[in-house]
């Protein structure tokens, strides 16, 4: 680009200079970059939770042959145990996807349930996936507790007058404790 100086084009001197970046040109460069950045932010974040096991590992567990120790060596410690007894082990693997700030969605889930008999050998191996999962709704009830429910004012004002005005501290030892520092009754 040529820069023309002076008033009369006949007697003008020309100088070369760098072309300034116009706002349109800046927009043409930054708009595709921002679009790519925005699209990259919309891609989901994938997380894997729990055990990673494959069909070969589950196939190596044979009912009536494989023991608890062998399952522990092969699969590691279970994700969960049965509630009241340790005769059923659960291995859980989950894959979740989170898009930006939305709640994570479970896209894949595998559960391997291994049941043991009294002799410590595997009696049953069950597999379940996400298609067999069921949604549950937690109960919103609150378990009542014994005692009084005091308001903030009752809590703050309830201690007025309860303090002892004596100058010497009260003995706070339990009733079975001797004043000499030992238990009563020779023990």
Image (tube, rainbow, N blue to C red):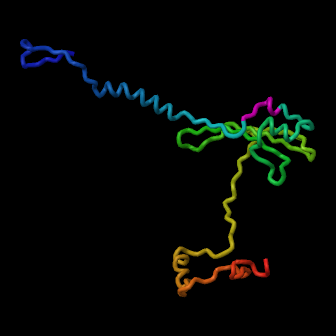
What residue appears at the point 82 percent right and 54 percent down from the top-left corner? 84
Q: Name which residue lies at 91% across and 45% down.
A: 117
* Rendered residue at 58%/36% (across/down): 45
Q: Is residue 12 left or right of residue 168?
A: left
Task: Give whichever of 127, 63 is nearer the camera.
Answer: 63
Residue 178 pos. (x, y %): 71, 81
Q: Is residue 37 left or right of residue 70?
A: left
How many discs appear? 0
Image quadrant in which the N terminus is located: top left
Residue shown at 7%/12% (left/top)? 10
Q: Quadrant of residue 163?
A: bottom right
Residue numbers of the magenta segment: 52-58
9 vs 97: above or below: above
Tell me where residue 122 appears, x and y as whole percent.
Answer: 88, 40
Can residue 133 be found in the magenta stretch? no
Task: Choose top left, top right, bottom left or bottom right for residue 140.
Answer: bottom right
Q: Position of residue 7 (x, y in %)?
A: 7, 19
Which residue is nearer to you in this view: 93 or 39? 93
Q: Where residue 52 sits: x, y (%)?
A: 72, 35
* Quadrant of image for the C terminus: bottom right
Residue occupying the far top of the picture: 10
Q: From the viewer's perspective, is residue 57 above or below residue 175?
A: above
173 left or right of 66 in image: left
Nearest the viewer among 170 and 139 is: 170
Which residue reaches farthest bottom?
166
């Amino acid at each position: 680009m040529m820069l023309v100086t002076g008033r009369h084009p006949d007697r003008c001197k020309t100088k070369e200079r760098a072309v300034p970046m116009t706002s349109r040109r800046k927009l043409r460069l930054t708009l595709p970059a921002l679009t790519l950045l925005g699209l990259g932010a919309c891609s989901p974040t994938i997380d894997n939770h729990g055990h990673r096991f494959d069909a070969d590992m589950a196939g190596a567990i044979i009912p009536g042959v494989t023991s608890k120790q062998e399952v522990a060596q092969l699969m590691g410690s279970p994700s969960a145990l049965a509630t009241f007894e340790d005769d059923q082990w659960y291995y859980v693997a989950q894959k979740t996807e989170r898009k930006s700030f939305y709640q994570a969605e479970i896209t894949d889930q595998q559960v391997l349930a291994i049941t043991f008999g009294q002799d410590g050998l595997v009696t049953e191996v069950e597999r379940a996936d996400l298609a067999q999962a069921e949604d549950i709704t937690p109960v919103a009830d609150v378990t009542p507790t014994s005692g009084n429910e005091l308001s903030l004012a009752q809590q703050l004002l309830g201690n007025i007058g309860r303090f002892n005005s004596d100058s010497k501290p009260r003995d706070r030892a339990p009733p079975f404790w001797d004043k000499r520092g030992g238990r009563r009754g020779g023990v």
